[in-house]
Image (cartoon, rainbow, N blue to C red):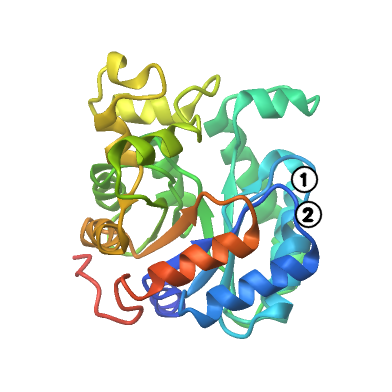
Amino acid sequence: MAVAAVEEMRGRLGRVGAVLTTPVATADEWRRAARRVEEAGYGSIWVNEAIGGREVFAQLGVLLAATEHAVLGSAVANLWARHPASMQGAASVLADAYPGRLALGVGVSMPASVEASGQKWTSPLNRMREYLDGMDAAAGAAPVPEVPFPRLLAALGPKMQGLARDRADGALPAAMPVEHTRAVRERLGPDKLVVVVQTAILEADPEKARAVARQAQLLSLPGSPYVRSLKELGYPDEALTDGGSDEVIDACFNWGDETAIGKRVQDHLDAGADHVALAVFTPDLAACADLLERLASALPAQRAEQPSRR
């Protein structure tokens, strides 16, 4: 995307979006939740995918049709789930059908889930580079949307962030501290998108909030890239064991009342994020929409002027 197109997408996204995720829900439940989130004022709605289950582009198509103006994004589309030509073609079809309303986040997943699918895990950086080559080679056979869609990489480490700078329109890191957001902006420069996925735990009791955060098991998953990235930020090994120290949990997970969550979102915007997508821990989509509606009034205004990138 040209710099002007990136700026236009910043405006479409606004400052704060929402992540919708649940293991089991009907299409009608997804539609209702998406409409509620859009009506609450969130500028974007993001969905993810494993290998199998709810295919992300079919899911995005359902939600694009159910909403009116929110940007719909993949956070992320798993590159191990499809051929790169299929990734390019699917994104192009949706972007053509819904101009300006698609953001494509692409990620490499983790070794355990890839190998469980019967595939062989390889170097994530090389795999992503080759996959982007395949997407680019397939672009000529895909529809050409009136409004280009941004291609974002799920980039936690500096090498993947460099690839996001050189081969994509920006980065889409998740569950990282504010200092990580600042480092991403410095590596990518002013003309790339930085969209960060952050959690919101509406719980003011520290022990209860941290217990909820540790249930995510981000630091205990085999081959966790979050552990590696936190080490690169200077967190010691002992702080990253047994589910993470209180300091690590407090840095990576946003908990407290509505005001506290809003302040943490603002901290990431001040550190250089263009857009913060909030994920909440709930048992179902209706409860997810409930919490996101509660949070909406305490979050930074969607169209407020953002900090200078230069």
- Residue with the mark numbered 2: 86
Q: Secondary structure at mark 1?
A: loop
Q: Residue at x 44, y 26 (%)?
A: 219
Q: Is residue 33 visible?
A: yes
Foreground residue among 38 and 142: 38
x, y (%) of residue 139? 70, 62
Foreground residue among 75 and 282: 282
Q: Is residue 61 visible?
A: no
Residue 298, located in which quarter of the rendered image? Answer: bottom left
Q: Is residue 296 above or below residue 159?
A: below
Foreground residue among 81 and 4: 81
Q: Amino acid at mark 1?
A: Arg
Disc 2 packing (10 Å; few <14; some 14–19; many ≥20): some
Q: Is residue 210 above or below residue 224?
A: below
x, y (%) of residue 51? 74, 39
Residue 188: mark in rendering: none
Disc 1 packing (10 Å; few <14; some 14–19; many ≥20): few
Q: Residue at x 70, y 66 (%)?
A: 30
Spatial CA distance of label 2 from label 1 is 6 Å
Residue 64, located in which quarter of the rendered image? Answer: bottom right
Q: Residue at x 68, y 74 (%)?
A: 32
x, y (%) of residue 226? 42, 31
x, y (%) of residue 156? 41, 39
Specify whether 126 is left or right of 241.
right
Quadrant the C terminus occupies: bottom left
Specify whether 203 is left or right of 9.
left
Task: Tell me whether the residue at label 2 lies in contact with that at label 1, contact meaning CB atoms closer than 8 angstroms.
Answer: yes
Residue 82: mark in rendering: 1
Foreground residue among 295 and 104: 295
Judged from this view, the residue extending furthest toward the bottom is 68
Q: Residue at x 71, y 38 (%)?
A: 80
